[in-house]
Image: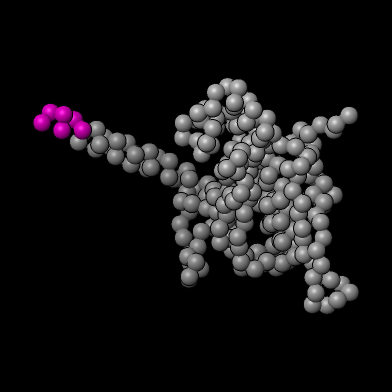
Amino acid sequence: MGSKYKITFVIKLKTFIRKIKYILVFPYVWLSNYILCKRYPFYRYRNEFTDKPLGYRYTFYGDIPYGWRKAFGKQFSKELKSALIKDGYLKTFRFIEIKEKYGELRLYSTDYGPESSKVLEKYENISIGFCIRCGKPARYCTQGWIEYLCEDCFDSCYRDKNSNLKNKELNEEEYQSYKNQSRLTEKDIPTITRYEKDPDNPGECVSRIVDLKKEYNIDLKQLWGIQDKS
């Protein structure tokens, strides 16, 4: 009976500690998110059917993976707000979902104008240049579950027992081989295609290759540390 009471006591104690942490931390989280949503209203959670604003416990900004928030989160927020103001969509623009997919940032939202489209497209495209976990320039791309990682995070993933990577059983020699195969090279730079209205044929679209360096001042080759072959 003694051990049964001990287990019950430990469970109740852990529940009590969780509640105390919530009481202490929640006001700070609420206030931080409140200020964020007042500055950038498009980050506030809303009822998808009624559009009624929900509380401030969570925001869409928090849905952006930590590394990307650290790398370009503030800049993205400022540029998107300015673009929405130019387009006249600041009050009506809503995020539907923000997540990572195939190692890239995905931004799902309601209607927006041309300037906002450029900003959203920009940060979806350049997200692969940065480590999703810490925000440093990416150096490796994992296989299977795709993540763009810096060297430190790549190594820590290998040693993490809860990692999504499937190479936990590799010995050091096999791991180094896997690591070399995962190193980002010039071949990994994606070809990004944009479809635009054809000025010569109204109602028709033309495809164009997006030059990240020219349009966004982002050089993936330099960011990934790819050296020219001499």
Above or below residue 34? Residue 144 is: above
Residue 136, position as x, y percentages in the image:
67, 35
Q: Which of the 4 image quarters holds residue 119?
A: bottom right
Taking the spot 49% from the left edge, 66% from the top edge, the residue there is 48
Taking the spot 40% from the left edge, 40% from the top edge, the residue there is 24
Decide whether residue 157 is among the magenta residues: no
Q: Along the line of sight, which residue is nearer the eye, 119 or 131?
A: 131
Decide whether residue 3 is among the magenta residues: yes
The prevailing secondary structure element of the residues shown in magenta is helix
Taking the spot 50% from the left edge, 48% from the top edge, the residue there is 31
Q: Is residue 19 left or right of residue 135?
A: left
- Residue extending furthest toward the left: 1
First to last magenta residue range: 1-7
Residue 190, position as x, y percentages in the image:
74, 48
Q: Quadrant of the C terminus?
A: top right
Taking the spot 48% from the left edge, 70% from the top edge, the residue there is 49
Q: Is residue 21 left or right of residue 79?
A: left
